[in-house]
Image: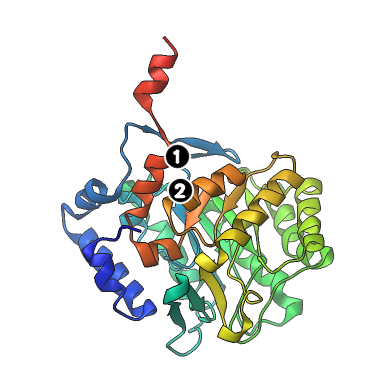
């Protein structure tokens, strides 16, 4: 894997510190008059590439985006837009601020090219994130914004659906699609709904609210890689039988190696994530959109995800560990030049 000098320096730092440094420098660059231009020049895919997609009724300038957890509070939307990503999934968004677990809460498994995350989803809460999304500027007009909804660590199971609905109602007019996190790997208490009843309890109130709105906002369900084949079948049945618009597969894995005490992301997860994307696509007869996430570390992984059936691909650990230029390299692999398309029509 080719890494820049800057990325190699970041990898000398602890994983969470490395990410904070990247995001801070990106924010500083965004405040410089020509900063976003430099981001675009150095990181964004070429406009000559044919990357545009129409997925669940939403236009994406390219199918490669940012998964939830990378910019959880929506602080760097302008800079990520300038960097050329097709979409950014903010969150997980929760109703109130929560600090997460004490640091260190993110660590590297260097030999395995993976991370262990037991952060507990630190968040500044709904109101802070709403303010960031409301202040979107013209620089983000091409960037599709997704909202990943999660639960507060301390929320009682009986109140989870109300909590999700509160975030959904408040964010509805400000984002382009929603991802309902059914793989909430909070550090203090894991919450992974597995039964049909548990999953419907999350999404049915959202369907009901959406029916009363003038604008249609797609709803996807994000699932855990730790689900059994039968549990994945239940998810696909819900996808087919309800107004659900798609699936995001997958979140981090707790079952893959429980000895590490957190959710495994990165290269250890790659094959399992692609396997689930392929299974969901085949089981649903390729009739529904899938966002492929989890373990997407290289441009080859992006290609494999899309060949497995993903309509869109969301990056997180791959960028943290291998750098922002992963977007451009992946875009070059999956795109065809516009000139080629024009020649073929003559």
Q: Residue furthest left?
A: 33
In depth, the one of 142 and 9 nearer the eye is: 9
Residue at image location 35% in from the left, 72% down from the top: 19
The vertical placement of 154 against 28, above or below, is below
- 268 or 338, which lies in front? 268
Q: Which mark is first along the chain, 1 or 2?
A: 2
| Disc 1 crowd, CA 10 A, few/some/many (<14, 14-19, 20+) | some
Name the residue carrying label 1.
334
Relative depth, front residue between 113 and 192:
113
Whole-percent x and y of residue 177? 56, 51
**Number of marks in picture:** 2
Residue at horizontal 54 percent and vertical 77 percent from the top: 96
User: Farthest front residue?
Assistant: 111
| Residue that appears at 56% across and 72% down | 94
Answer few, some or many: residues within 10 Å of disc 2's Cα (few below 14, many 20 plus, some between 14 and 19). many
Residues at marks 2 and 1 touching, judged by CB atoms closer than 8 Å: yes
Residue 249 image position (x, y, % from top left): 62, 57
Q: Which residue is mark 2?
A: 64
Q: Name the image colouring.
A: rainbow
């Amino acid at each position: 894997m080719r890494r820049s000098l800057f990325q190699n320096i970041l990898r000398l730092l602890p994983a969470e510190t490395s990410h904070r440094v990247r995001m801070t420098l990106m924010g500083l660059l965004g405040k410089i008059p020509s900063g976003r231009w430099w981001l675009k020049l150095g990181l964004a895919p070429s406009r000559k590439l044919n990357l545009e997609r129409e997925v669940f009724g939403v236009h994406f300038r390219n199918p490669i985006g940012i998964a939830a957890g990378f910019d959880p509070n929506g602080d760097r939307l302008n800079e990520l837009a300038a960097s050329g990503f097709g979409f950014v999934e903010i969150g997980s968004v929760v109703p109130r601020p929560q600090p997460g677990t004490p640091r260190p809460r993110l660590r590297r498994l260097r030999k395995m090219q993976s991370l262990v995350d037991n952060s507990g989803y630190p968040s500044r809460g709904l109101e802070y994130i709403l303010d960031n999304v409301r202040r979107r500027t013209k620089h983000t007009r091409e960037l599709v914004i997704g909202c990943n909804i999660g639960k507060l660590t301390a929320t009682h199971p009986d109140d989870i659906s109300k909590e999700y609905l509160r975030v959904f109602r408040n964010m509805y007019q400000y984002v382009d699609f929603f991802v309902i996190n059914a793989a909430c790997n909070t550090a203090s208490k894991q919450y992974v709904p597995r039964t049909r009843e548990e999953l419907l309890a999350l999404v049915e109130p959202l369907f009901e609210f959406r029916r009363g709105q003038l604008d249609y906002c797609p709803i996807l369900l994000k699932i855990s890689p730790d689900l059994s084949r039968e549990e994945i079948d239940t998810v696909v049945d819900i996808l087919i039988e309800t107004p659900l618009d798609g699936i995001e597969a997958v979140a981090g894995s707790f079952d893959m190696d429980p000895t590490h005490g957190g959710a495994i992301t990165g290269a250890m997860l790659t094959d399992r994530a692609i396997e689930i994307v392929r299974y969901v696509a085949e089981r649903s007869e390729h009739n529904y959109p899938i966002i492929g996430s989890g373990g997407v570390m290289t441009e080859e992984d992006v290609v494999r995800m899309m060949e497995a059936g993903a309509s869109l691909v969301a990056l997180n650990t791959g960028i943290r560990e291998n750098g922002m230029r992963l977007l451009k390299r992946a875009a070059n692999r999956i795109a065809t030049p516009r000139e080629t398309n024009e020649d073929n029509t003559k």
